[in-house]
Amino acid sequence: MGTTLNDTPSAERTHITFFGRMNSGKSSLVNALAGQEMSIVSKVSGTTTDPVKKSIEIHGIGPCVLVDTAGFDDTGDLGGMRVSLAKKAAQQADLAVMVFVDDSEKEPLNQDSGFVYERLWMDLLQKRDTPMVLVINQRGQNGNSQNLAEKIKAEFQKKPLIVNALTKEGIEELKKELVSAAPGKEAERFITGDLLCEEDVVLLVMPQDLQAPKGRLILPQVQTLRELLDKKCTAVCTTADKLEKSLAAFKQPPKLIITDSQVYKTVYEKKPVQSMLTSFSTLFAAYKGDIRYYVQGARVIGQLKQTDQVLIAECCTHAPLDEDIGRVKLPRLLRKKVGEELKIDVVSGMDFPSDLTGYRLVIQCGACMFNRKYVMSRVEAAKSQGIPMTNYGIAIAYLNGILDQIELTYFDK
């Protein structure tokens, strides 16, 4: 089903991610919160493999995604892969729930090693400034939850909430705790920043090619168009081949033209002098990432040598298309600028290498499919390793010699 204007894309929802050991009851808690069986529940350890996601609404937070992850004490080759996926889920987490378990039938699973696993993962989440809620999942009626709660409080200086996922006891209290701990929404964070006011006229240039399936618009176009309507702007849409005819229909030039980055140069050459120009990807550079770092990174393109290696990171996982921007058009522009021997790697989805030291530059897509928390984890990884980073729109503007002529949006950090 295609995205409609009334949908809240997953990337724009608050990601609430559940962590804990195998068979600690994470899946049961997620099911209890969601009010439906979204995750398989079994006494067999290691049932959850890939992170399982469910979009819901929580009053006080709004649209959310509940993410159920594999146990972080999983072992073996397959277990290591599951834990690796859980770590990637941690990079997307806006809010984390650390699950402990009190099982009356046996010793609490979290006491055998002095909370070593929990400490490691909580340290990881704290480094990412991810707020956390601690939960004890009480399975039996004769458990020792209060004693376990005291031990957890002494270890982490934070009192856990006691719930029972099977009987639903404590679930409403857990919702309240999530609302209290949830990160506040960034004030007035718009895709178009402060470029527009009510009644401004905007022209959207949107080529309809293989990357825009028939009958649908790509997500950045949908989100931007919806925001323009919310801002009470007048939005006019056209394709690149009809740009001149569309401009001629205006009594006054549009205040802003937002184009697909692939036709940046064409639109720049044809736009009225009075009209500001930007692109969807350029807007998302600020909306999802660190635009100042991206602009600095784009200028590194002028210093690249053919012996350098560049990483292009897409968030989509679609099959390669003819004239694909990340796999074909952008590499073509880079090699035209630097030389045909320039080494370029392309990764997609969450396949982002932890070691970036072999790269001279990382070029990130607009990242409409990921939340800002995850995109910023990539930015921080690049910064910590001293690797310049930019994004598609900023890089294409630089390669076309118009980076200093386009409009950029900035947000306070």
Image (cartoon, helix red, strand yellow):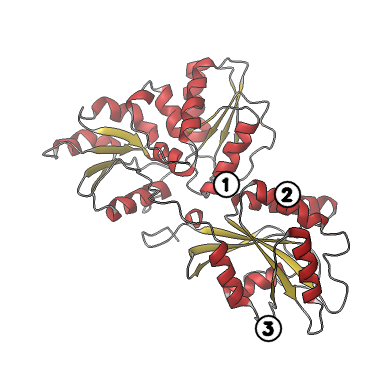
222 horizontally vs 20: left or right: left
* Nearest to N terminus: mark 3 or mark 2: 2
The amino acid at mark 2 is: Ser
Nearer the observer: mark 1 or 2; the answer is 1
Q: Which quarter of the image is occupied by the N terminus?
A: bottom left
Res. 346 image quadrant: top right
Query: Which residue does the image show at 41% across and 36% down from the upper left?
Result: 282
**Helix, strand or loop under label 2:** helix
Label 1 residue SS: helix
- Residue 361 in the image: above or below residue 118: above
What separation in Å lies between label 3 and label 2 (alpha carbons)? Answer: 32 Å
Mark 2 Cα shell of 10 Å, populated few (<14), some (14-19), many (≥20) = some
Q: Which residue is mark 1?
A: 374
Residue identifier under label 3: 167
**Circle 1 residues within 10 Å: few <14, some 14–19, many ≥20:** many
Question: Which label was assigned to residue 84?
Answer: 2
Residue 321, position as x, y percentages in the image: 50, 39
Q: Earlier in the sequence, mark 1 or mark 2?
A: 2
| Label 3 secondary element | loop
Can residue 329 be seen in the rendering of this structure?
Answer: no
Residue drawn at 38 percent across, 46 percent down:
191
Front residue of this view, candidates 342 and 368: 368
Query: How far across and down, in percent of the image, does residue 17 sit?
Result: 63, 60
Residue type at tag 3: Thr
The residue that appears at 49% across and 56% down in the rendered structure is 184
Using the numbered discs, state the Cα–Cα distance from disc 1 to disc 3 in whole angstroms: 34 Å
Q: Amino acid at mark 1?
A: Tyr
Gap in Å between the C-alphas at discs 1 and 2?
15 Å
